[in-house]
Amino acid sequence: MQVFNIVLVAEYPEFFSALAENLRAENHRVMIVQDIFAMMQVVEVSRPDVVLIATDSPSRDVLEQMSVMLEHAPRPIVMVGKNEEATVVQQAFRAGISAYIVESLAPQQWAPFLQIACAHFEADQELRLALKVSKQQLNDRKIIEKAKGLVMQVYHLSEEDAYRNMRSLAMQHNRKLVDIALELSNELLLNNPSL
């Protein structure tokens, strides 16, 4: 059985005492944080395997702090709540949690559940990275196309020749094509206000 390092965030002692006891019964290491606003700092320093948030119902502050934490110190987040309304669960997932449990689990059920939550988190992180890369590639392509259009217009070149010249410039200066394209666009627009 995998043993997890867990940061348990709970605003009320009645929420975390039994939960922490169950987790420790299965040898998981649990650090308790009672202030949601201290969560990110604790997570950045301790780098747990999982962040477990115990709450009646996630407030806007809880959801915002989760989003901030996921941006700066991404970790799988499992929420243990008492509210099973679909809208509440959907809001929590949109904020970035990996799993939501209503009430709690038996001690021996935690390890497999946390493994699934971690796997879900890893898959989600891969998708987020792929989306970020795709967006950057699309943005780079737009910059290159704009520069190519300006080079064609100013120097009366064909599309192929404009691209070849830009690529050649990038290789000569050992720089990315998108960086050359951005500089070219700025320079051409500055020197040719009528464009």
Image (spheres, rainbow, N blue to C red):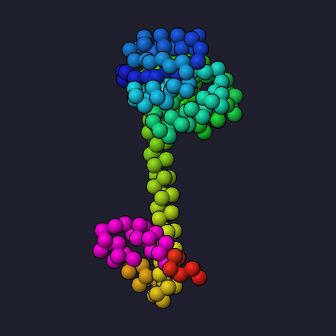
Type of secondary structure dominating the magenta stretch: helix
Q: Indicate the quadrant containing the C terminus: top left, top right, bottom left or bottom right.
A: bottom right
Q: Is residue 108 visible?
A: no
Q: Position of residue 186 (x, y in %)?
A: 49, 72
Residue at 46 percent across and 23 percent down: it is 7
Q: Is residue 179 visible?
A: yes
- 187 vs 76, nearest the viewer: 187
Residue at 59 percent across and 10 percent down: it is 14
**Does residue 1 sit above or below 96 in this rendering?**
above
Q: Position of residue 31 (x, y in %)?
A: 44, 18
Q: Position of residue 59 (x, y in %)?
A: 65, 28
**Does residue 86 sit above or below 168 in this rendering?**
above
Give the quadrant of residue 183: bottom left
The answer to whether 186 appears left or right of 101 in the picture is left
- 57 vs 111, nearest the viewer: 57
**Does residue 79 sit above or below 195 in this rendering?**
above
Q: Indicate the quadrant containing the N terminus: top left, top right, bottom left or bottom right.
A: top left
The answer to whether 164 appears left or right of 107 in the picture is left
* Stretch of the chain drawn in magenta: 166-188
- 56 vs 154, nearest the viewer: 154
The answer to whether 175 appears left or right of 38 in the picture is left
**Does residue 146 sit above or below 28 in this rendering?**
below
The number of callouts visible is: 0
Residue at 63 percent across and 30 percent down: it is 61
Q: Is residue 46 magenta?
A: no
Q: Position of residue 155 (x, y in %)?
A: 46, 87
Q: Is residue 170 magenta?
A: yes
Q: Residue furthest bottom?
A: 156
